[in-house]
Image (cartoon, grey):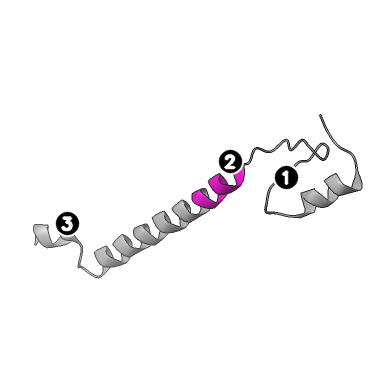
């Protein structure tokens, strides 16, 4: 089921919320996809921040593994 209308083409130009409407009553992208995308982005940003925090702490000599060796 694909749509080739101006409405469907306009929906592909937006990034969020994700929709692929076939008609007024049928959306091919489930409602659970939008929160999943947001949760994934938040998780990646949080994991990156934690990795940077530990990396800076290790380089500064404040890491737990660095103090146990000394």
Q: Main secondary structure of the magenta part?
A: helix
Which is nearer the eye, 49 or 55? Answer: 49
Q: Earlier in the sequence, mark 1 or mark 3?
A: 1
Would residue 40 appear left or right of 10 to someone viewing this image?
left
Q: Give the label on residue 19, or none.
A: 1
* Distance between the alpha carbons at the discs numbered 2 and 3: 41 Å
Query: Which quadrant of the figure contains the C terminus?
Result: bottom left
Q: In the image, residue 35 lies at what x, y percent?
A: 56, 48
Q: Nearer the viewer, mark 1 or mark 3?
A: 1
- Quick check: is 4 in the magenta stretch? no
Determine contact: label 2, label 3, CB under 8 Å: no
* Distance between the alpha carbons at the discs numbered 1 and 2: 11 Å
Residue at 25% of width from left, 63% of height from top?
58
Q: Give the label on residue 32, or none.
A: 2
Residue at 17% of width from left, 56% of height from top?
65
Q: Earlier in the sequence, mark 1 or mark 2?
A: 1
Which is nearer the eye, 2 or 65? Answer: 2
Mark 2 surroundings within 10 Å by alpha-carbon count, few (fewer than 14), some (14 through 19), many (20 or more):
few
Q: Earlier in the sequence, mark 2 or mark 3?
A: 2
Q: Give the label on residue 42, or none.
A: none
* Distance between the alpha carbons at the discs numbered 1 and 3: 48 Å
Would residue 32 appear left or right of 24 to someone viewing this image?
left
Magenta span? 33-39
Residue at 40% of width from left, 54% of height from top?
47
Secondary element type, mark 2: loop
Q: Nearer the viewer, mark 2 or mark 3?
A: 2
Q: In the image, residue 6 lies at what x, y percent?
A: 90, 48
Residue ID for mark 3: 65
């Amino acid at each position: 089921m694909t749509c080739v209308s101006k409405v469907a083409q306009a929906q592909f130009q937006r990034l969020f919320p994700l929709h692929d409407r076939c008609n007024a009553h049928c959306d091919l992208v489930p409602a659970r996809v939008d929160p999943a995308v947001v949760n994934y982005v938040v998780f990646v940003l949080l994991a990156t921040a934690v990795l940077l925090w530990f990396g800076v702490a290790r380089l500064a000599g404040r890491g737990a593994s660095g103090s146990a060796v000394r």
